[in-house]
Amino acid sequence: MDSRASSAPRVVIVGGGFAGLSAARTLRRAPVQITLVDRHNHHVFQPLLYQVATAGLSSTNIASPLRHILRRQRNATVLLADATGVDLRRQRLILGDGELPYDFLVLAAGATHSYFGHEEWSRHAPGLKTLNDAIDIRRRVLLAFEEAERETDEARRAEWLTFVVIGAGPTGVEMAGTLAEIARHTLRGEFRRIDPARARIILVEGTDRVLPPYPADLSEKAQRQLERLGVVVFTRKMVTGVDARGVWLGEERIAARTLVWAAGVAASPIGRSLGLPVDRAGRVKVGTDLTVPGHKEVFVTGDLALVEQDGRPVPGVAPAANQMGRQAALNIIRTLEGQPHSAFHYVDKGSLATIGRKAAVAVIGRFRLWGAPAWLAWLGIHIFFLIGFRNRIVVMLDWALAYFTYQRHARLLLGPPSPVRSAEAGEAPAHSLTHRSS
Amino acid sequence: MDSRASSAPRVVIVGGGFAGLSAARTLRRAPVQITLVDRHNHHVFQPLLYQVATAGLSSTNIASPLRHILRRQRNATVLLADATGVDLRRQRLILGDGELPYDFLVLAAGATHSYFGHEEWSRHAPGLKTLNDAIDIRRRVLLAFEEAERETDEARRAEWLTFVVIGAGPTGVEMAGTLAEIARHTLRGEFRRIDPARARIILVEGTDRVLPPYPADLSEKAQRQLERLGVVVFTRKMVTGVDARGVWLGEERIAARTLVWAAGVAASPIGRSLGLPVDRAGRVKVGTDLTVPGHKEVFVTGDLALVEQDGRPVPGVAPAANQMGRQAALNIIRTLEGQPHSAFHYVDKGSLATIGRKAAVAVIGRFRLWGAPAWLAWLGIHIFFLIGFRNRIVVMLDWALAYFTYQRHARLLLGPPSPVRSAEAGEAPAHSLTHRSS
């Protein structure tokens, strides 16, 4: 079947996120053979992952198979594999079970959350970077309400009804706002012994305000909108401990059964495997042409790259990843045409963070928006950029229905059978349910 | 919160499938307190599970949270728990972690596939009864094509491209027909080294024809439609062995990496736990009023019940389950009103099995349909009975798009990371991928 194998230069792209796909698409007419390597078979529209975690969208709404996205691009192949390192000298990508030679390499393996050296916290406070993460968090949130309904001890019930989101960047703010909506609206009337609206949603931030990269006045507006939804915001609080029953903030403890981690940045370990300079988060320092020192054929893009512009790092957002992927591809084309690389220049199209129904903040050029106008801008932009026509239609329908009914249709507990009272450290002995008859 | 706890009779229903929900809804105005117990938090529209397994529908399209379905029924509570047995004398349902007293009990825990005493086969040939099963099978099917794309040895590649469905009842026929469609249409053009249309789909049946409960002429029509789609049908073949690399049919072996089990019936073990007469499949023999011998307060319904009518057992289909659930509830109401139980009478509204695009067979009263008319009847009926308005709309949209584009949007591999070459017994050592450059 591989009779088309030619002497065309081999471009290997690691990662099917925004940066990797943008690089592959930019090369669609180039005389190269592209292999896109990813551990997952699908591209995920990450800005909407929190909607899957909070049961507003189904995982199929925000993801598309990579093969399907690239099916018409005859110079591109998708390889489902785990890239573990790079042999820069021999020009080979090291996979879990083999290796792949390249003439050009584009690393776009992304980043995940950082637990600041406490990886053991991840078990109790999962992050939100993949569809599996989102389904796991959805499961924990839904089960917490089920457990609260069964619990007879008031203090334990309060633990199940306390949700702590750690980190008040865009993801943390979106999670906290949406959890508050679920508790106050979506689940209304569905339980018989608890009132879901009594759930406490706590958002913990280490710096002095929510959404630290935003202008201070928008941070303040975001915090007020969160509080109106019922979220308790703690700023200047560092998490010093995490376990199955809560978090420590220095001397202070919050007893909570459901924790979500949305703090810090840790770049994919493949960055460090290059043996080149990286920053504390593991992002690879690249030149203005996005290549690594001494290797004009190796590009690093997206959240894995540390690119400075005007003295500040380019932010880890989807538009920046798109632009970097495109620039890396353009530089590959320039090399093939015998031209020198051109420099990457990030065009900031603005920032948007949503908080809840008709609650958001946005910076677009010189304009600052908040409340309903920011929220409408957020809706439109996210639907517009969702990959796949079908997903756009279905997401619009889901959101329209969700808006008018407050319902969230994706509230399915999936995973191992018998989810309740599953093996959990420190679980008290099972109690009888016979009290129900008294 | 339980201040409403009253002296109203306690009705405990085990299972949130068609029978259990039908019983709960029939009791909506009765002066009882209902507890619906299920291991899962959602009702699944089982007749469409195969669509999730074959990536045509997302799991959220065919399932609804039980709490949501019953949210307005104030006399009903949902309890997420594992029912393990019944203490008939003390009138208590035994749960994994407690017990629940009842005045009336409706067992509607359903059935699963039977491996005829070879439970170890289930690991290699999963059945299709829950959403988790469907997601697991979807994962296996999609990964098989990925593995075939990476495989360089022709014989091993053929193993990955062989799919065996065991059992040619309605589920097996639907699975085989849809797998053939995926191979021939959906995946067309997405792979670079394999031609998915070369996949072999084999349907194995122990009796002498597909769809054994149907009239013989419709079985023949169904088989011809399957063969036109490219399915190879083996009848009068008993599976005598199953392993990770294929199945044994007596002396004959089919090398295949993906097996789906759709044979036999094994009722929920809670039926046997009663210590009352059951049939070979574990179904509980009930009287005409659906109660068990000696216990007028204990009803068994749906696939868990063995009810004879006109000398033949009532079939294990959704309409029969609905009708039994309703009858059990009516008999509870009659008891409360001081009237004797009335007898269950199954009204057969017809049978329908789908095979693929415009391919189906149906028996409706005296009419027999096949081909496009049967398929349209099947479509209409299934959409009509799907629980939830939203799901009806989304499923219609999905199907309309799927029909015109041959696409299946739910092709997401979910589950543990690094799915390829996961720990599998008998896996050969990892091979190098450097051949790609040659």
Image (spheres, coloured by chain):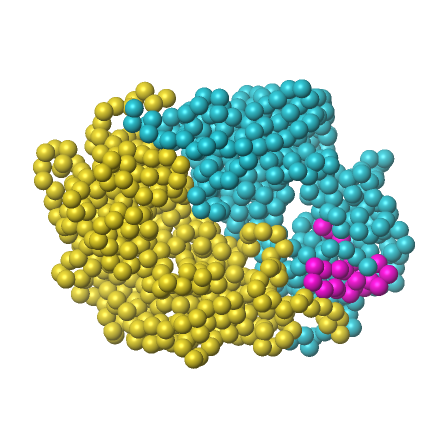
Chain colours: A cyan, B yellow
Quadrant where the C terminus of chain A lies?
A: top left
Magenta region includes residue A106: yes
Residue at coordinates 44% horizontally, 71% vertically from top-left? B241
- Which residue is most to the bottom? B251
Number of residue marks: 0
How far from the left and from the top, in percent, is residue A64? 57, 53
The structure residue drawn at horizontal position 71% and vertical position 68%, both measured from the top left corner, is B433
Does residue B262 lie above or below A214 as drawn? below
Compared to A242, does B393 lie above or below?
Answer: below
B127 magenta-colored: no
Q: Quadrant of residue B350?
A: bottom left
Looking at the picture, tell me which residue is in the foreground, B51 or A272: A272
Quarter of image, res A263: top right
Judged left or right of residue B269, residue B430 is right
Asked if residue A229 lies left or right of residue B167, the reply is right
Magenta-highlighted residues: A88-109
Q: Is residue B61 visible?
A: yes
